[in-house]
Image: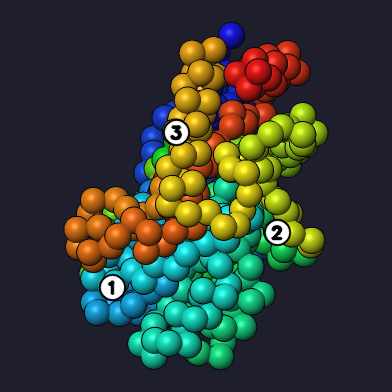
Amino acid sequence: MKIPISKPYFDDEEEKIIIKPLQSGWVVQGPFVKEFEEKFSAYTKIPYAVASSNCTTALHLGLIALGIKRGDKVIVPSFTYVASANAIEYVGATPIFCDIDLRSFNLDIQKLEDIVVNNNDIKAIMPVHLFGLCANMPKIMELAKEYKLKVIEDCACGFDSWIGTKHGGSFGDCGCFSFHPRKAISTGEGGMLVTGIQTLAEKVRCLRDHGASKSDLERHLQEGGSLLPNFNILGYNYRLTDMQGALGVTQMNKAQKIMQARRKIAQWYNEALADFPLLLLPQTPENFKHSYQSYVVLFSPSYEGLTLEMIAKYNKKRNIFMQKLESLGISTRQGTHAVHTLKYYCDKYYFKEDDYLTSLAADRLSISLPLYPQMSESEFDYLINSFKKVFG
Ligand SMILES: *Cc1c(COP(=O)(O)O)cnc(C)c1O
C-alpha cells in the first residue's frame, strides 16, 4: 500500500468548472476570482479578501501596504516555512527571529515579549499559525497595541483555524493564506490576503495588478473601457488566474466537508497514537480550533530540557523511524524547518544552530504524518499497524 503525505481534494466539480474560463475566454483574474474572494470573506467572516498568485506574494504585498521598508525590523518565528522570512527580505527589512513553544510549534510568548521590550526599533510582528493552529493572538495583539507594532499573520496553514469565534487572519492588520496543494484547500498555486481595513485592501488590490488604479474587470464593466487606467504606484503582477479562481469557488463550496474529514482523521490519530512511546501528539489549547493542515508529532521523550546532545540522539532515531515507514510505502516529512539554520540566513546573519534551540528541536524531531480527506479506514489501519511494526 502507498500512502502519500497529502492529496488535494478534487472531484468532478473541479473538472466541470475549470473549463468554464476556457469557454468564455476570460482566463486572467476576473469573475471567478471575485466570487472566490467573496466566498472566502464570508467563510472567515473577515470583511475584505484579495486573491493573489500565492501566499508568499500576498505576504510581500501585505508588508508593502503596511509601510514596512528597508532597514525595518519584523519579528517572525524561527520555526516556519522559509517563505515567511523571505517576504520580509523582499522589502529590504530584517527578520528578527523568535523561538517557539514546542507544544504549539508557534511563537513563544515570553520570548516574544523579551524581544519587544528589549528592542525599541521593531516595526511589526509576523506570527505564523503553523500546521493549522493559531498562534496566541490575544497575547500578541496586547503586545502589539502597547508597543504600536503592525501585525501581519502568516495564515498559510491557517484555513478554518479559529480562536473562539474569530478566524485566523482577523486579529492583526491583515492575514495571508495559501492554496498550495499541501494546504487544506487548493487552487494549485494561490493566495489570499484578508483584512478588516478597507484602505489596506484597496492598496493591495492595486499593488497586485501592476499598481493599476482600476482592475480589468472594473474597466470592462464600465463605459470607456478601452482607455488604460492610471498607474500611480510601483506595482507587481501577482494576480491569480480565473482558472484558479474557479477552482477556489468549488473548493469553498466543499470547504466544510473537507475540514470535517481532516478533523476526523486527526481524531483517529489522537486515539490510535495516545499510548505510543516517544510520540508527543499535537496539543490544542482551550478555545482554539485546530484545522490540522498537517498532523505533526514530536519524536521526543519530553517537551522540556532538550539539549543539543539529546536533539542529535533522537534526531537519529526519528530519521530511522521515517525511513522504515518510507520502505513500507508511507510518506512522512519533518514538520518544517528552523529558518536560522538555512544557508542563506545562516550566512547573512551569522546564526549558530543553538541560537534558537527549540526551533532546532522542532526541525530535528518533528514528523508530519499523512493526512488527506479521502483517507480510508483501511489505509489508516495499515498506517497504524506499520507504526507498531516499526516500533516493535
Ligand atoms: C506554505 C507556506 C507558505 C508559502 O505559501 P505559498 O502559497 O506556497 O507561497 C508560507 N508560510 C507558511 C507557514 C507556509 O506553510
Q: Residues within 10 Å of mark 1 (few under 14, many from 20)?
A: many
Mark 3, residue position: 316
Q: Is residue 6 left or right of residue 85?
A: right
Image quadrant in which you'd find residue 325: top right
Furthest residue to the top? 1
Taking depth in this image into account, of 59 and 84 the one nearest to the observer is 84
Q: Position of residue 373 (x, y in %)?
A: 67, 29
**Dot 2 amino acid type:** Trp
**Dot 3 amino acid type:** Lys
At mark 1, the secondary structure is loop
| Nearer-N-terminus badge (2/3) | 2
Image quadrant in which you'd find residue 227: bottom left
Q: Is residue 129 visible?
A: no
| Cα–Cα span, label 1 and label 2 | 29 Å
Q: Residue at x 27, y 69 (%)?
A: 91
Foreground tag (2 vs 3): 3
Mark 1, residue position: 93
At mark 3, the secondary structure is helix
Q: Residues within 10 Å of mark 3 (few under 14, many from 20)?
A: few
Q: Position of residue 240 (x, y in %)?
A: 40, 47
Relative to residue 43, is residue 235 depicted above or below? below
Mark 2, residue position: 162
| Nearer-N-terminus badge (1/2) | 1
Taking depth in this image into account, of 259 and 80 the one nearest to the observer is 80
| Cα–Cα span, label 2 and label 3 | 35 Å
